[in-house]
Structure formats: C-alpha cells, structure tokens
Image (spheres, grey):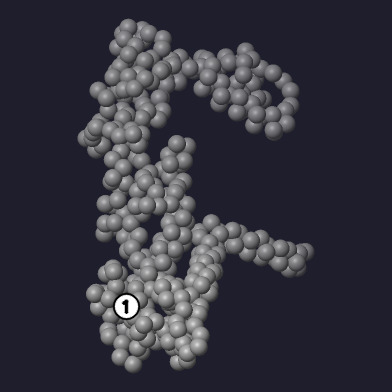
Amino acid sequence: MSKLNIANIPALTGSDVPFEYGLDDEYFVAEAPKIVKFVAFKLGSNNLSVELDYKDVYTSFQESYMEFCTLSSNYQTKSIINSLIGMPLDIVSGSNVSFEEKLPKLSMDLAKLQSLTFSREGGVGGDTNLKYSNIDLKLGVQRYDIREYINNEDIPLVSGTYVEIKEIFHFSPVSAYRFFDTSSMLNYLNNQFRFESFTPETIFFLLPVWEDVLRAQQLTLAAKVRRSHYSYIINGDYITVYPVPQSVQKMFFSYNIAPISSQNTDLAKVITGLANVPFKFLAYSTLNENSRQWIRKFTVELSREILGRVRGKFQTIPIPNSDLTLDYNDLISNSRENQDRLREELKLLLEELTYDKIAEREAAKANTLQEQFKNVPVYIYTG
C-alpha cells in the first residue's frame, strides 16, 4: 500500500477528478493541493501511514463542493418554488432573469407577484390589462360568438388560449324605478333637503347612522339583483343572453385573453418542480470562509471513508509473531456519522434562512418592538 505523499502534490487537472465542476475557478484549483495536506494531517499522516492517493482527496474535495452547492440550491428553491412553477425555462434562464450564481433578493416583489392573480380577479389591479368591447344585440337573437366581437390586434387569439369575460355592463334602470322604489334612500333625503311633501314615498322618522350604512348596502345589492333587465350564460366562446332581445342595442363587456389549463402546456418548456429549476453551482471563489470550512471538513470525512474501504481490503497485516488488525470498521462508521452530522448542521442553518423563516423572525421582532414602545411614556399636551 502506498502512502499519501504531501511533499510533491501535482496541481489539480481534469484527469484527476470525474467532473469538470470547479476546474474553471482559480480559487478552487489553488486550494486543492492545500486540501490534500489538510486531509493528510487530519488522518494522522505524521504518525501513521495514510493509504490514499492525491486523486482520492481531489475527488472527495470536488464531491464536497458539489454537496454544499446542492444543499444550498435546494433550500433556496424551497423558498421560492411557488413563484417559479409554471414559468418558462427560456425566460428564467435568459438575460432578464438569471439564477446563475445569484440568489433572489429578499423583498416584497415576490409577495406582490403572487398577489397579482388575486388582484386581477378582485378587479383591483393584476398582471393583465383588461380589454373592452361590445356586442350588437339583434332582434330575436340570443346566442353570440364572443370572438367575433373582440379586438384581437393587441392580444392575438392563438391556439391554447380562450376569451375570459370579466364583467358584463347592463343598462341602468329608468329613473322612475329609482324614484318610486320603496327601498330607496330618497325618503331620507327628502327630510334633509326639505322637499318631503313633493314625493309619494315620504316617511317621517329618525334613523341611526349604522342603519343608513346597511340600507346603502341593501340598495347596492338590490340594484345588482332585483333591477337587472338581462342575464346571460357563457359556454365556451358563446354567450347567451336572456330574455330574447326585443330591440337592437349594445351590450358592453370587459375581457382578457387567458391561457387554457396546463393540459396544453409543454412541460418540457416550463419549470415543473425542484428537478428542473435552473440553479447552477455557486462559484467557489464567491463562497465565504465559513462555507469553505464546511467543504474542507466534509472532504476529510469522505477521504476517511475511502481510507476505511482501502484498509478493509487487507483487514490484517502480518508482523513478527502476530497480525496487525486495521481499523477500517471504525473509519467507515465514524466517517458516515460525521457526514450525517455535517449535513444536518448545514440543513438546520439553511432551514432558518428560508424566506418563510426570515418572515417569521421579522414578525416576531416587530411584535417585540411594539411591546417595548408600549412602555415609553407619551406626553399629553394640555393647553
């Protein structure tokens, strides 16, 4: 068995490791020979024979670097996966949004992005510009093809999209309906402006403010439900109006062009989950010393496992009057335990750095500050 020679360590080249990761980083290549010395000293090369080759250590070093980057990327993906699923891969990996050697900035942007869909449905913003058009209702015709009445110059109707009607605008009821409606607020306005004797629905009594608010809500609901002259049913690209139009008039509506469900989406072109999020390994030169120290420790444990397997092939070495039993079992078991411990330590740290954990800590900090400010005396000015 050969001993790990630290007196003359060749520079790291592509033939020394199974993958190309890190070879284009001068910091990674420069640290590789130092890692060989570090591993040799940690395994006791000053007193014992270390039956490893420098290529074994280089391979362990590269694997440790890959392991660290993988764990880091997985937890970063966990923070933002809900914002990534469904995004086109060519957009994410393009020049506008690049995840290569970058982490998304912690800001309100992600929360705003997630709220756009809800804002659009609520009619208070969103990520889609509404379009407006109208249908020329014809005498005796109830069913109309929506696509014939939309302006598709700005948003072309391509395969895999459909017209999403957001709102239908009805004509307001004639003024007499509001004037003589027994549920209107006109009788209270009569009292305020002193013309109660000129209307047929005057009621003379006082009401609390909260009843006025409830009555206003009642009027709004009645205007939408009880006063509607028309109703409609949308089925696919067709809208059917009720009752049968008895005159020629226009019916206005707002809409946008929406994609059909993901059944028609090419999954090979969008992010579907953790497996195809376009993260790449972080450059070794960008890692701080804490991160590099984890990689060094993990390299030692991987090298320790290789050493244990090498010694396990021999198990015993004959010496005068006895046999020397090698400690391969202890090396392998200790190596695996230490690897698991290092992984768990890193996972616990990364778990605390996900965006939801950061948000929880910020919320707790805000609550603590509020409790502290409650004890600050507030001066009351008396004139």
Q: Which of 47 and 293 is in front in this view?
A: 47
The answer to whether any part of residue 301 appears in the image is: no
User: Is 167 positioned to the left or the right of 346 in the image?
Assistant: left
Q: Which of 226 and 38 is in front in this view?
A: 38
Seen at 27% across and 28% down, the residue is 150
Measured from the top left, where is residue 291 in percent x and y?
45, 75
Seen at 36% across and 20% down, the residue is 235
Q: Nearer the viewer, residue 62 or 150?
A: 62
Classify 10 Å Cα crowding around label 1: few (below 14), some (14-19), many (20 and above).
some
Q: Say which amino acid is labelled 1.
A: Lys
Q: Nearer the viewer, residue 31 or 361?
A: 31
Q: Assign the N terminus to one quadrant of the image.
A: bottom left
Seen at 76% across and 64% down, the residue is 380
Measured from the top left, where is residue 94 in percent x and y?
26, 57
Q: Name the residue under label 1.
A: 55
The answer to whether any part of residue 37 appears in the image is: yes
Query: Extreme left residue here?
Result: 153
User: Is 111 positioned to the left or the right of 276 in the image?
Assistant: right
13 vs 363: above or below: below
Number of numbered markers:
1
104 vs 171: above or below: below
Seen at 26% across and 37% down, the residue is 155
Label 1's element?
Answer: helix
Measured from the top left, where is residue 112 in percent x and y?
45, 51
- Using the rendered view, name the quadrant where residue 191 is placed: top right
Query: Extreme right residue here?
Result: 382
User: Is 171 positioned to the left or the right of 186 in the image?
Assistant: left
Query: Extreme front residue here?
Result: 321
User: Is 60 positioned to the left or the right of 340 in the image?
Assistant: left
Q: Assign the C terminus to one quadrant of the image.
A: bottom right
Measured from the top left, where is residue 361 in percent x and y?
59, 62
